[in-house]
Image (spheres, helix red, strand yellow):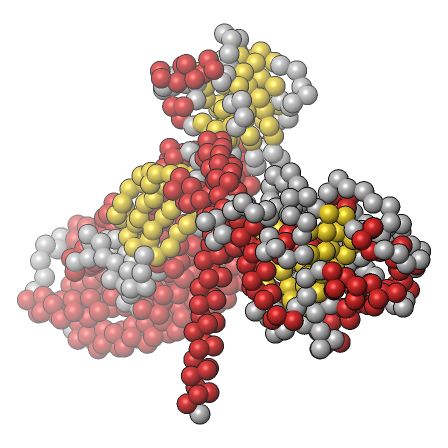
Amino acid sequence: MIENSSTQQQHYLQDQQDEVINVKGWLFRLVRVWPWFVTSLLICFAAAWLYLRYTEPVYQATASIMIKDEKKGGGSAFDNPLLKELNFGGKGKLVENEIEVLHSIDLLEAVVLREQLYLTVKNKGRIATWTSYGADLPFRVEMANPDTIDRSYTWFLNVADKTWKLRFSKEGRDMPVKLGEWYLFKNMRFRIWPNIDFHAKSVAQLEARPDYILYLRPVEAAAASLKGSLEVKAVGKLASVISLTLRDFHGARATAALRSLIELYNQQSLVDKNLVTTNTIDFLNDRLAVMERELRSVESDVEGFKRANNVTDVSSEAELYLDMAKDIDRQKAEQETKLNIVDALERELLLNQDNPRLVPSTLGLAEPSLAILIQRHNELVLQRGRLSERAGIKNPALLDLEAQIKDIRISLLENVKNLKAAYTIALDDVKRQDTRLRSRIGNIPSMEKNLVQISRDRSVKQQIYLYLLQKREESAVTLAGNVNDSRTIERARPAGLVKPQKNLVQGIALAVALLVPFLIFVVMDFFDNKVGNSRDIEIKCQAPMLGEISFVRKMQTPIQIRSNSRTVVAEQLRSIRTAISFTGKAEQIKTILISSHRPGEGKSFTSLNLAASYALLNKKVVILEFDLRKPRLLRNLGLKKDAGISTLLTRGGNIGDMLVEIPGYNGNFWILPTGPVPPNPAELILGPRMPQMMEELKKQFDYIIIDTPPFSVVTDATLLQQFADISIIVLRQGYSFKESLADINQRLSRFPHMPIYTVLNGVGRNFKYSYYSAKYAY
């Protein structure tokens, strides 16, 4: 159990080490492709520079206002008891409602008209166009009827010469423009003025870029675009402060539009409040005129009675009854006043039932339910008035408002009727008291009685007149003291450039510049189906690996190993030779079969150099050129021999006459060439002369290297395995397919008694795998 645990730990440590080596190799390969990253950085930063240079910038303006919201504590300067009694400041508003009002198309259309946002002017450059506004423009365009803009138009204006030229389309002809003169184009009346606020510093720019493009849009479309660029939100759930943000291609235009939005919002709110108060004052003026006439009539009656009867004073008893009657008269006057007001309100509601108008609110009736209904009725009438200005009579929203007004007027009439009944009952009670008092006054002489009666009528009229006069003055004070329910906390001001953000764009460019080559490298690595390094062979192939052979960039001769060779390849071949001596059969290995999976993997190169390495040990070595179909080994060495293996296997003969010596190895290095290309190589290998030839060669040579054709193409290598002690399959880095490793495994399973080993050739040719050859640089 302890031994198994130790073994598992060793495997775990080996896996960790292999993983570290693989990561290091992978990172080293990334470093080797630094030109990719440099090129990508240059391209991406050039693209970022072009984007920053020619993308039209977007600017932002901000502002904030505080709404008088009683629920959220948004107070104003008028939140004190005295001013509240005078109805200063009005009632509080809901922040959520005001956000919708600030976003309303009607309000935004007013902003568009005020700031001429239906017109956008761009200065045309060589590549890009830039929005110009205000002092950046050498001219001003005045549109007399912007509501006639029915679709989008694009005009072109050139201000290079003294005579400016205007063109209404790309294909149109230039029209000279007389400054200040009115022109008519498709019902649109406009004129062009020179801009006296034009920056002097822009004159040079004007000479370089005298062309301007004028974009006209319908007011509704411009308002919709403005709504999309406008952000209105509350700064917090418990706050009554609204933050406004507007984005535009010109900072000054964004600031001006936001400033106009706040001003128009305050103006419309104040107009609505003043309209209700003005209506109340008009109603009170009408009533005062009526009461003034009645009071004059009563005064005339008193004066005539006294003159006719020579009355200057009344008796003390009459004075006593008069004092008692004053209290009753006061109560009677109050009830009659309320009843008169209710009657007048009822007549107003009935008279204008088909065309509802605003109903006076401040009438002095302390009835909360009636006040709420009147306020709601007036709000609906105001909404209907604003909507009817831009909508048809069949508009669903208008019809809905009409229905709501009708319903609330029914509720108002019902409430007024109930109040009228209550006031009538109270008045009847006062009248009963007055009747009892009259019976007592009946004892007074008729003259004094009549005088008292006339005086009482005058007193009632005076009280009513003074009451109405007081209410009119209160309404006038309220009208004069009406203020906005909002207060500007932060005025509209530019907030700077929003996009393109230089740091963000450059950061994205850097990220893309590093990520794109990395992804390309990863994708190429993922789809790479070629053998890359020894790790691929060790993981996926069951055949042990003897070594690697580096790629030779300048090869003058196929044989790279000689007695004085100290190259990387020479040392690698000596290492492979040593590794062969440590395989299973060790000293019994005399015949080595070298093959490959496909042509071009370097089996002939490996055969020549491995044979040369044995020859340097003063061992007699012969290479059998068994690629009987396409012999190239002898031809690559610049040698020629007509007879060879095919001659021996067909007709027999003397092997010594057919051997070719490789010079420079003291007679230890020989090649038995293919000879004439036979029509039946497989049959010759299986023939009776093949074992005889191999026995004779073993007697003459210490080592026999069999160079065979690729085993996946023909069966020659498989047939020759029986004559070899071990088989070496040469794979080429970046050339051999990884599927060949599965074929080698299958070959091992089919011939378990035959030792098969692998050698990786061409290491370091492809930069993708350069890390794995770097360790041989010594």
- Residue 108 appearing in the image: no
Q: For residue 257, which quarter of the picture?
A: top left
Please give the count of numbered marks on the rendered protein.
0
How far across and down, in percent of the image, does residue 163 sit? 53, 8
At 81% from the left edge and 42% from the top edge, which residue is drawn? 640
Q: For residue 683, which quarter of the picture?
A: bottom right
Residue 730 higher or lower than 635, as above or below: below
Q: Is residue 292 left or right of residue 418?
A: left
At 69% from the left edge and 56% from the top edge, which residue is drawn? 621
Residue 366 higher or lower than 520, as above or below: below
Q: Nearer the viewer, residue 235 or 218?
A: 235
Q: Is residue 689 left or right of residue 665?
A: right
At 68% from the left edge and 61% from the top edge, which residue is drawn? 703
- Residue extending farthest to the left is 316
Q: For residue 523, which quarter of the picture?
A: bottom right
How far across and down, in percent of the image, does residue 273 sit? 34, 50
- Residue extending farthest to the top is 162
How far across and down, in percent of the image, does residue 398 sit? 55, 55
- Residue extending farthest to the bottom is 1
Q: Is residue 671 left or right of residue 329?
A: right
- Residue 324 appearing in the image: yes
Q: Nearer the viewer, residue 82 or 458?
A: 82
At 48% from the left edge and 43% from the top edge, which residue is drawn? 34
